Image (cartoon, helix red, strand yellow):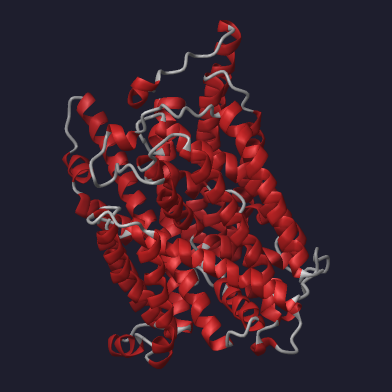
Amino acid sequence: MPAVAVLLGALALFALGYRFYSAYLANRVYTLDPAFVTPAHSYKDGVDYVPTNKHIVFAHHFISVAGAAPIVGPAIAVFWGWGPALLWVVLGTIFASGAHDFGSIVVSVRHKGKSIGALASDVISARARILFLLIIFFLVTMVNAVFAVIIAGLFIDNPEAVLPTLVTIPLAIGVGQLIYRRRTAALVPSLVSLAIVYACIPLGQLLPVTVDPVAGALGVEPALVWLVLIFTYTFFTSRLPVWMLLQPRDYINQQQMVLGLLIIMVGIVVGMNTIEAPAFRGDLPEGSPSIFPLLFITIACGAVSGFHSLVASGTTSKQLDKETDARYVGYLSSLGEGTLAVCSILACTAGVMVFSAHEGAAWTDLYADWASAGASPAGTFVQGVAGFAANIGIPESVGLVFATVVVVSFAATSLDTAVRLQRYTIQEISTIVADQAAEGGSMNRAFLFLSRNITVATLIAVGVPLVLALVPGNFAAGTLWQLFGTTNQLTAGLALAVIAVWVTKRGRNPIAILVPLVFLVIMTSWALITQLLGFLRSGEAMQTFVLAPLDAVIFVLAVWMTVEAALALRKAFAARRTAGTAEPEAPAETAAEEQ
């Protein structure tokens, strides 16, 4: 199968999805109101609540949710063949992710910019809030651990990419000053900054940065040094105002994403490469996991991802200038991530075979077994992009550094956002515990202190995933990724439950939300049980005593939260039947007060 045919077919379906399906969601399901006063205006504080141009918000949301996950997930999932992976990416993006991301922004905007965990309390029940927040805590912990491991691994394998990546940070701060201090348009400064980053690629090749001497002196592995440095960096950056580093770096990365996708697509068209992998792999190696349900949790970001609801309700909704911008920001970002996932599939099934290091090798040699598929998925993607870049005359050595910078930049942005979101989650949980203690006539000083102390909350937000990332054998065996994917999809299902109840209460047809909701709940519950049994049978200490208990706790929380959502949905339908009419719409002038 020509790779270009797959690419063009997927893009055509995505275009149709935006033109027709997102319009249906906007007009008939979410009923967007251009006069609605968004929280960015009602609670403007210059730090988190900042009315922002929709293109910049799109850049922030797109880059924050894209990260490395839509690259890594498909790079592993093509183990079963490119056909099932492609179908899940395309259909999941159009019908699940688009509705999920779009809806998460709208519901949060209509509830004062509250996080999805707080929304669970408002929309479903008071108990649902703490349950959802606990699930979010586990999810974001694994997101941070996985992304940090990916960055550390790429830096170790490609030290030439470290310098160009580091240059992005001061450039982004400079762009932020120009945009928000001097009111300069963002496009030209971001393009100039990106040009400087790529101009540093030859310098990075001359001056590769490695931590081997430091690791040797301390008697530890280089990965440990990189992980400590990465989480130290995120501790500081996650506390900065969003306009200072997060937003301008997102805008630079948006241009980088566009350029990266352009190079991949042009390379596909010029090279006319053929997909070497089977569409459906019937002769799986012995001991391979079943495609059901693991395909649907291996590819999370790029099809549908609960992490998106955290970004949508945690930072994006607080920056939305107009409610009608939610369609552009939410649905189009989902399509952009789906496009990246399609490119990852093609890079790992066609582009990687162009890469000179694999000359003469068969695709099945690269995916000989499940362990090989999960050993270095980001590295496989990087090599595939280098292969496509070679089709248009870019040397493979430069293509490798370029692709590494792209992946690390996306992962670092998601890591920064995720640590910020984890801080919010920790403080929300602490506030709930402290308030409950106060209602009982006592005072929980520890949780009261934690709810108000940003420094301690951030230390926990970076410390817990650092410990998890340092557990031996976590990512190389693919086990942590599987648990991350399952929790991620579970969170997506629960976010859809919140959206479904909200839509039902407003008298709208929730079928567009209920279909992906039911599908995700079934697949994630199935996966959690399958993985729990696998962890217990593995005989490995990490899986038996770390991952198995985590899996069990998440499963119990999932069942409890699902029951709460089902009861709330049943109550909403009953109220509609009894009243015969929808709940009245809140007037635009009271937008900030809608509950």
Left or right placement of residue 175 versus residue 87 in this view: left
Q: Residue at x 24, y 45 (%)?
A: 46
Q: Position of residue 535 (x, y in %)?
A: 57, 59
Q: Residue at x 24, y 31 (%)?
A: 435
Q: Is residue 356 above or below residue 325?
A: below
Q: Position of residue 334 (x, y in %)?
A: 56, 49
Camera-side residue: 116 or 333? 333
When asked about the image quadrant of residue 271, the answer is bottom right
Could you tell me which quadrant the N terminus lies in? Answer: bottom right
Could you tell me which quadrant the C terminus lies in? Answer: top left
Left or right placement of residue 415 versus residue 78 in this view: left
Camera-side residue: 365 or 284? 365
Q: Position of residue 48 (x, y in %)?
A: 29, 45
Tell me if I can see residue 529 in this picture: yes
Left or right placement of residue 493 versus residue 142 in this view: right
Left or right placement of residue 213 versus residue 274 in this view: left
Residue lying farthest to the top in this orientation: 579
Q: Residue at x 52, y 23 (%)?
A: 568
Q: Is residue 436 above or below residue 585?
A: below
Q: Is residue 54 above or below residue 591?
A: below
Q: Residue at x 47, y 76 (%)?
A: 153
